[in-house]
Amino acid sequence: MTPGARRALEAAARLFYERGIHAVGVDLIAAEAGVTKKTLYDRFGSKEQIVVEYLADRDERWRAFLARYLDDARPAQAARVQAVFDASRAWSAKHGSKGCSMVNAHAEISDPAHPAFPIITGQKQWMLALFTDLAREVAPDGADRLGRSLMLLHEGALVAHGLNVFADPIGHAGEQAQALLATAASAEAR
Amino acid sequence: MTPGARRALEAAARLFYERGIHAVGVDLIAAEAGVTKKTLYDRFGSKEQIVVEYLADRDERWRAFLARYLDDARPAQAARVQAVFDASRAWSAKHGSKGCSMVNAHAEISDPAHPAFPIITGQKQWMLALFTDLAREVAPDGADRLGRSLMLLHEGALVAHGLNVFADPIGHAGEQAQALLATAASAEAR
DNA sequence: TAGCCAGTATACCGATCTGTATAGTGAGGA
DNA sequence: TCCTCACTATACAGATCGGTATACTGGCTA
């Protein structure tokens, strides 16, 4: 990716997240990135493609960001579940608090045939699979149920954080997740 | 509200929810409602005001919709918590499955000074207060914590439902909520 | 009968939208 | 030296944006 393209994608990412996708025009992206529209269309071809690469890049960065937290928390699975919530809190602190960019993008993209659609749904599927995998060692029999519960707590916490419903919802969700893990583990030990 | 204004608000509500607020223009709203733009601006004054009344109307309708479920479930508080999730599932089935209109609107409204902002945050605050109130009788000491957990489950379920992460997330959240209530009640009985 | 009111139809305003066109600049490599 | 590549600058196209203007119609009510 050329320097101009990189600056453009960074500017687009910031603007899309802060103001919404439809509210941001290509002229503004170009101006904020210090490139011309010509450069934008030479590199990306369309605004839609910029949106796609914005979301794909977010997803990729989040997974890499999370991977470090998960690695550091090995090997206990309960600690690794906690690491997901810790990573989310750190990510939110760094990238702003308007909630999940995938959820927000989904609010603006109605057409399931939109090329960004599989990125959005894929990210959520991946997170569900992650939670289910983490749950499997703690409670093999109830892994699916436990994974889904962890997923709901996590998604709810991101929303509550974005809308500022109460203080530190991600921390609260992490604590609740630990309680869930403990209950599930003792239930299977029976 | 005049007949034309009512049709306009109904059309706007449907279009805003399905396609997003910024993606829908006033010309389209007028065309879909079978009114002219003159009528729109005579009745509402601005697109922003249409957005405000759309969200305020949604909020009002949801509270009335929920109130019937809550009343029918009296007096047991656990049943009333379940009623919130039952109401959410019925509401989603009736109004479409793109998640919470408040969360989606928040994704598109960046300015906290926007007149729709207090409606969005107010709705979430009201839901948190409701869950906390319901939790109070079950577990007086841990009502705040329990209320927040129920809130996270509920919000997470709405997101998961909108993004179609897995089947029937609202039902799953309801079950999880019941488990939480049972645990909290027995913990306080100790 | 007169006036008001909600509505229609149509045309227009300036601004902004995505996207394209032409022309030119400066650096690096074969 | 010559070509390619990334980039700048500027102008413009066609459509749509939110919002306004003028002129008119039908129904209700005082």
Image (spheres, coloured by chain):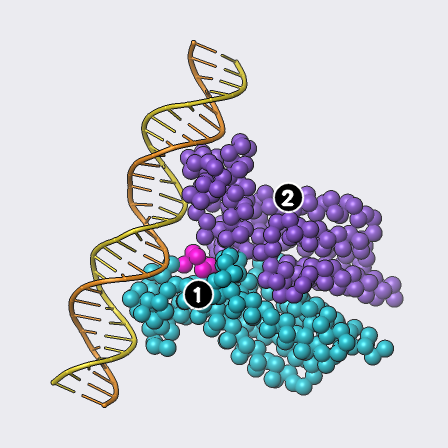
Chain colours: A cyan, B purple, C orange, D yellow
Where does residue A161 sit, x and y in percent of width and height?
A: 59, 63
Residue at image coords 71%, 72%: A144
Secondary structure category for the residue under label 1:
helix
User: What is the chain identity of the residue bearing mark 1?
Assistant: A
Where does residue B127 sit, x and y in percent of width and height?
A: 67, 53
Where does residue B158 sit, x and y in percent of width and height?
A: 64, 58
Residue at image coords 68%, 43%: B64
Please state, as top left, top right, bottom left or bottom right, where the N terminus of chain A lies in the image: bottom left
Vertical position of residue A3 compared to residue B34: above or below: below
Vertical position of residue A4 compared to residue B43: above or below: below
Vertical position of residue A67 compared to residue C17: above or below: below
Would you identify the image quadrant in which residue B183 lies? bottom right
Asked if the stretch drawn in magenta spans residue A5, the answer is no
Residue A51 disc label: 1
Vertical position of residue B119 compared to residue B184: above or below: above
User: What is the chain identity of the residue bearing mark 2?
Assistant: B
**Boundaries of the magenta span:** A18-24
Q: Main secondary structure of the magenta part?
A: loop
Q: CA distance from mark 2 to mark 1?
A: 34 Å
Task: Please state if A29 lies on the left or on the right of A72 as rendered.
Answer: left
Residue B61 disc label: 2
As shown in the figure, which amino acid type bears the numbered disc 2? Arg
State the residue lying farthest toward the front. A113
Residue B130 disc label: none
As shown in the figure, which amino acid type bears the numbered disc 1? Val
Which label sits in the foreground, 2 or 1? 1
Alpha-carbon neighbours of circle 1 within 10 Å: few (<14), some, or many (≥20)?
A: many
Where does residue B101 sit, x and y in percent of width and height?
A: 57, 52
Residue at image coords 75%, 64%: B176
Please state, as top left, top right, bottom left or bottom right, where the C terminus of chain A lies in the image: bottom right
Secondary structure category for the residue under label 2:
helix
